[in-house]
Image (cartoon, coloured by chain):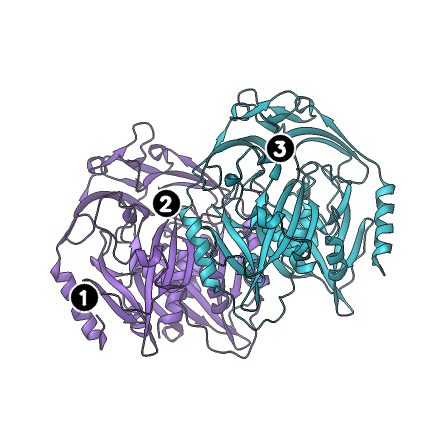
Chain colours: A cyan, B purple
Amino acid sequence: MMFADLTEFHQWLAERRAAHEYRVVPTPLKRLDGWAVDPGTGDLHHRSGRFFSVHGLDVTGSRREVGQWQQPIISQPEHGILGILVKEVGGVLYCLLQAKMEPGNVNTLQLSPTVQATRSNYTRVHRGRPVPYLELFTSLGRGRPLADALQSEQGSWFLAKRNRNMVVRIDEDVPVLDNFCWLSLDQIGRLLAMDDLVNMDTRTVLSHLLPRGEQVSGRPLHTVPEVLNWLTHHKTTDRTVRRPVPLAKTDGWRVSDDDVRHEYDRHFRIIGVDVRAEDREVRGWSQPMLAPCGEGIAAFVVRTVGGVPHVLVQARAEAGTPDTVEIAPTVQCNPGNLAHLPRTRHPRYLDAVLEAPPERVLFDVVHSEEGGRFYHARNRYRAVEVGDEFPLDVADGFRWVTRDQLALLNQFGGLLNVETRNLLTCLGFIK
Amino acid sequence: MMFADLTEFHQWLAERRAAHEYRVVPTPLKRLDGWAVDPGTGDLHHRSGRFFSVHGLDVTGSRREVGQWQQPIISQPEHGILGILVKEVGGVLYCLLQAKMEPGNVNTLQLSPTVQATRSNYTRVHRGRPVPYLELFTSLGRGRPLADALQSEQGSWFLAKRNRNMVVRIDEDVPVLDNFCWLSLDQIGRLLAMDDLVNMDTRTVLSHLLPRGEQVSGRPLHTVPEVLNWLTHHKTTDRTVRRPVPLAKTDGWRVSDDDVRHEYDRHFRIIGVDVRAEDREVRGWSQPMLAPCGEGIAAFVVRTVGGVPHVLVQARAEAGTPDTVEIAPTVQCNPGNLAHLPRTRHPRYLDAVLEAPPERVLFDVVHSEEGGRFYHARNRYRAVEVGDEFPLDVADGFRWVTRDQLALLNQFGGLLNVETRNLLTCLGFIK
């Protein structure tokens, strides 16, 4: 399945959406089929001991605007596979994507990678149907890997979660199953400019397939060893300490039979859903989900220095970051959580991002986060260009790097957080 | 201090050795000043709660020759700094090294990096003298970083230990303190061919300063994405589980007032030492040390394929590897621990390494491991060249990679284990 133009694609997607019936019914946590609340701690876990669990986390020693806090967090210590199959046709690279239902999607179907499988999925813990195309990623006789990196996911919601991000190139023909289609990188670039269409897993994998930046005459502000020095300095001097706490005793959070929520209804809730779907590996299931309160923002400030475009990034430790700090965007926050704080405690550079004049906005799009764990989780991804009036000398913990430097670091895994990878993809593919 | 030739250097080193008095006195663990044995677990820790501790570890699910075992392990969760200052003089790069006493050194003094400091050292927990040259590495106004990576150390002896490996280049003159000297890379290469002289910390930092391999006409057997795919596959499919156990109940090990030892005197002992030294930051102290039983071996098999030299490496999980598996040498073992095992359970390729004819040996040298934690710990580092009779098709978990590919991966930290970094340094610098 390929499309002569995007109108054809949208027709196909609408047909996919109409062809299947899905229902996602909010359900009290205490009544979720297959899930149990630990009587001692209040932690949520599956009765099989598998899939994932939700417990409390105590964070101290952070250098963030708020230095210590407690929160619920999702713990899923297994590694899944997010893989995109690519193929060159007539000199153009195409990606095999699928229109996939996830219970947390605001619009049911979004474009997922060729394979988007938790370990429970692909080892078939839940006895579902086999994951299509999986063997092209797990045994590489037929394809050729272009990228394979173990990458973290949302550090403020997941404890040390990592998924394998893979791109495999194939030359032979493969059958295109129902719900799957080939899209060119150019088509994907145009779809990435639309809200809630290209899902998070596709976006993070695409960050490993970035075209190299245009040839520029100038030099980056910092060499790669200098960027690594800055990152390693922050990795080794960060003093964040994480300690699990019982979910029922997570300071500032209220646990009821229905849900878990912050005392002032900030940040997120943990809710339960019953899911009925026709064409998933399993036809129905129940699970807890994390439902953020309000829309977040992740943004790059971009400034050209000496003829070379640079992106402003920060070294940031989040609650669940797998290895101390990672590279994060210029701004990454949920503005709704800040309303009660004085402006002096707002994240650095938030104003520069929000108040940029329209002609300086490189892109601005609302994307959904992973619909398998997060319910209606949406972030505004935005990049704004600033001029010479924006100081080169930046706050402690921030650094100017080029897109190619980020793309290089990204290949080795574990250095860029998921919001940065998402922004890199938008920056690289949205025209 | 620079040397016209190595004779001058050896005179200088002999003077350094004569100028100071050191005594290292074995002492029962129970009587170590400042250290306590936990009455419940038998674990060893410093009364301040700092420095490091020794406890037991249970390892299961390993794909190694032995799939499960228990052992004592050193836990030191802080990051130290290993840094070499470099300077170009007349077009030649020089490194500032120091003749440093470590209690575990077989020969008291070895060549350490410019800075070799645990976090306890440089934050001055033990109220010693300040660490010279430290500020050139912690604040970078004066120098320019050439490398900075957080790297693991001996996974079979340390639990998730990592140190920062740094190379900083400086253009201005710095005073050369007593015990310090400038050595060219060429001089260091010749010293690396001598036993027990260039210490482990110097060797691991030097792996970040490798000259690029000679221009070769052919192509590597695998692309860098293919190498990353192989590594990530093993990272995500490794099933090693580590669980702390009380030292007193570590299966197969005997704890007495004097030491901790294996029931058949294999692997290593945990011993105590009292140290008296004139010119260290602190003039005397006591500590536990890990004393290996017998000499280990770490070796590369090297084979030229299509005009390009390749090194055979393996993906390996050790007891204390910080992040599942890392890249390890072709062979890494302690032959003394194998004497009781049938040959079929010996590590793969051990024979190829040990039985290579002399003209095929690229280097063969015995180096000491870190003398601050390990007592008389010596490994034979060896590389042997094999011909076309050696199969290209290798055992599961092994892969042929080039030296430049290893050097590239090494810059990002956490991918190559310390034995591989040591061998890379020998391969790159020994002429």
**In x, y percent, where is residue B104?**
24, 52
Single out the mark in the foreground, 1 or 2. 2
Q: Residues within 10 Å of mark 1 (few under 14, many from 20)?
A: some
**Amino acid type of the residue that numbered disc 1 sits on in the rendered structure:** Leu
The picture places residue B127, in percent across and down from the top left corner, at: 22, 44
Q: Circle 1 is placed at which residue position?
A: B13
Callouts 1 and 2 in the same chain = yes
Horizontally, residue A353 falls left or right of residue B417, namely right
Q: In the image, is B96 to the left or to the right of A344?
A: left
The amino acid type found where label 3 is placed reads Phe
Among the two numbered marks 1 and 2 on one chain, the one whose residue lies closer to the N terminus: 1
Marks 3 and 1, Cα distance to the nearest angstrom?
A: 63 Å
Seen from the viewer's position, the closer of residues B416 and A55 is A55
- Pointer 3 indicates a residue of which chain? A
Chain under callout 2:
B
Please name the residue shown 36% across and 52% down the image. B339
B115, A86: nearer the viewer: B115
- Label 3 Cα crowd, 10 Å radius (few <14 / some 14-19 / many 20+): many
Which of discs 3 and 1 lies nearer the camera? The answer is: 3
Q: Disc 2 marks which residue?
A: B78
Q: Against A388, is B257 above or below?
A: above
Per the image, label 3 sits on a secondary structure element best described as: strand
Residue at image mark 3: A268
